[in-house]
Image (tube, helix red, strand yellow):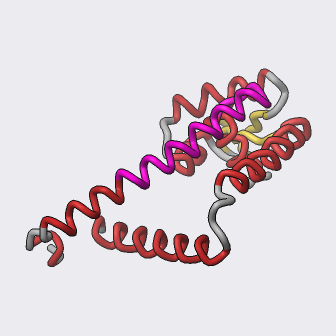
Amino acid sequence: MSAARQSPVPAPLSKARLRLWLRLLKATGEVEAELRRRLRAEFDTTLPRFDVMAALARAPEGLRMSEISERLRVSNGNITGIVDRLVQEGLALRVAVPGDRRAMVARLTPKGQEVFAEQATAHEQWVDHLLAGLDGDDLASMAAQLDRLTGHIRKECD
């Protein structure tokens, strides 16, 4: 058991960490809500659907449903429904895995790649605009701090 788990954290630092956590949630929620709104308004799509297409765009050889679920940390059922709709719309297809009759991978079609590329360009511009209040030093510092935090959390959870 780590020392952090054995001894109580002084109240002021504990409260400050809790307030920081709430601020992180609020900031993330604000950005996510605006991205959801813009995806719906400009592309008539959803953030989960965008995320599935992004995962498929990064894996041109295709991904099994379980691989998409793992990457996005959501249930297989959610992924299957999204992929079903992408297939119906001609944006994705399912391909049998050679040597495994039961296994299928999903891939974007050329049309799906084109649609996703347009959405991804807009998404990047929206995030850039939403975070425009941060300069290069701010971005580097925040990224380093978040990496440090992530490393600490992973270490504590092992």
User: Can you name the residue that lies furthest to the front here?
Assistant: 133
Residue 77 versus residue 7 in the image, above or below: above
Q: Nearer the viewer, residue 140 or 84?
A: 140
Residue drawn where x is 68% and y is 48% of the image: 55
Residue 154 versus residue 39 in the image, above or below: below
Is residue 61 among the parts visible in the rendering? no
| Left or right for 4, reference 104 | left
Magenta stretch encompasses residue 5: no
Is residue 46 among the parts visible in the rendering? yes
Residue drawn where x is 43% and y is 75% of the image: 148
The N terminus: image quadrant? bottom left
Q: Position of residue 46 (x, y in %)?
A: 66, 31
Residue 19 versus residue 42 in the image, above or below: below
User: Can you name the residue that lies furthest to the left here?
Assistant: 7
Magenta stretch, main secondary structure, is helix
| Left or right for 55, reference 21 | right
Q: Nearer the viewer, residue 129 or 51?
A: 129
Residue 16 versus residue 41 in the image, above or below: below
Residue drawn where x is 80% and y is 41% of the image: 119
Residue drawn where x is 67% and y is 34% of the image: 49
Q: Position of residue 51 (x, y in %)?
A: 65, 43
Magenta stretch encompasses residue 41: yes
Q: Position of residue 33 (x, y in %)?
A: 57, 37
Q: Which residues are magenta?
A: 22-46
